Amino acid sequence: RLNNTTFSDERLNPPQFAQAVATIQNGVPIVYSMGPNYTTNPALGRGLDANGGIKGARVALRVIDPSIQMPMYYSWFAGVQRQLPFNFVVEADYNGSAGRDLTKADGPTSEDYNRFAGDLLDGVRNRLNPSFDSVDFNRSVSRSNYEGVSLQVQRRYSKGLAFQTVYTFGVSKDLPAVATEVTNPDLDYGYASNDVRHRVAINFIYELPVKPANPLLYAAIGGWQLNGLGIMQSGQPFSVTCGFAYPRCDFNADGTTNDRVNMPSFGTNLNDPDQARWVSGVFTAADFPLPASGTFGNEPRNAFRGPGFKNFDLSLVKNFEVPGSRGARSAKLQIRLEAFNAGNWVNLGNPTGAVNNGNFGRVTGTRSGPRTYQIGAKYIF
């Protein structure tokens, strides 16, 4: 269902509410003065103009498409499973999904449609309707697609041991929240920001097969259990953009920044950099030619891949039988020693993708913390 704010935030529209912003690009001079009595900006008038806007200023609007459609998701699945000796099971699956008639945000504050390519070429932001600022128009224009194949080997729990290993190859594509060219959203159709090409997931449970009948001996060497959960996956995509306003960036001159640049001579191949190179920088701003004013960059959205990710969590568990418990199943006290990111691996985030940023091409953060330990107790009854 559509979020309520898709239509309820229209209460922030005129005539009940109006917000105007003075900017140089909009042709409204900015007046600086010291308080407590502030100088009135002479460019701002009272009353409405012929288009329903405030005289001397541009008001932002939140608009919903009268013919907006209910978003729809489709999903499909096909798989084959085979049981093998010794409690092993192998499985191969194909699954996919498709989102249609999606909105780009959960409210009217979504995408500005009061813009056009080439607007700023004369140095002034004229807009399609010059009486208003941004017109956030929420409509059923977005879509998404996913297809994936997974291969699985599983050993069902028997004699204290169970484990599962799954490899997934998947491709996820969608449209971003803001289009480079509002009249051509397909220009931005590409890999989703959460697209992961390869992923391996592992989990296991192993109970030490020692259960002596002597209560004291069982308390010492019985009831031990080792558990593990691991994930290894390839990097997630990112784009190279420029965040400055026109004329330094905003190459199509529509007033919306973060336009993509042109492709470098080496294409999208980063030659599998190690962590030291990710941190020092995998490329420089000089590698990326800037598009000519009034044009679009030829770099596809999310054309590059960041560092991969790997993590393994372990837990060592000791179970103590609690004497005097009632019922068919006895109660037990469980002492747990858990290690998160047991390998103490450094998982780097994506590099800075804005060519105007001083850290462009460098990774400045991580996606997970260092190895941590946790001790806990659990009473199970």
Image (cartoon, rainbow, N blue to C red):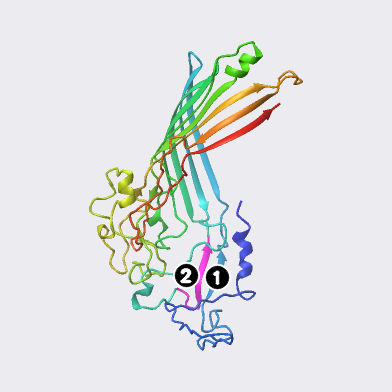
The crowding category of the residue bearing disc 2, from other C-alpha atoms within 10 Å (few below 14, some 14 to 19, many at least 20), is: many
Q: Is residue 131 magenta?
A: yes
Q: Residue 311 location in percent, x, y?
A: 45, 37
Toward which corner of the image does residue 274 lie, by quadrant?
top left
User: Looking at the rendering, in which quadrant would you find the C terminus?
Assistant: top right
Q: Which mark is residue 321?
A: none
* Residue position for label 1: 61
Q: Position of residue 334 (x, y in %)?
A: 63, 27
Q: Helix, strand or loop at disc 2?
A: loop
Q: Residue 279 at what x, y percent from top left?
A: 34, 50
Amino acid under label 2? Answer: Asn
Whether residue 147 sits left or right of residue 221 in the image: it is left
Q: Are marks 2 and 1 in contact (CB under 8 Å)?
A: yes
Residue 123: x, y in percent?
36, 78
| SS for dot 1 | strand
Q: What residue did someone put label 2 on?
A: 114
Calculate the distance from the C-alpha at mark 2 to the C-alpha at mark 1: 10 Å
Q: Is residue 101 left or right of residue 362?
A: right
**Nearest to the observer: residue 306 or residue 104:** 306
Asked if the magenta segment contains residue 337, the reply would be no
- In the image, is 37 to the left or to the right of 94? right
| Residue stretch in magenta | 128-138
- Quick one: label 1, few (<14), some, or many (20+) residues within 10 Å? many
Residue type at numbered disc 1: Leu
Residue drawn at x 56%, y 54% as measured from the top left: 69
Q: Quadrant of residue 7?
A: bottom right
* Viewer-side residue, 275 vs 254: 275
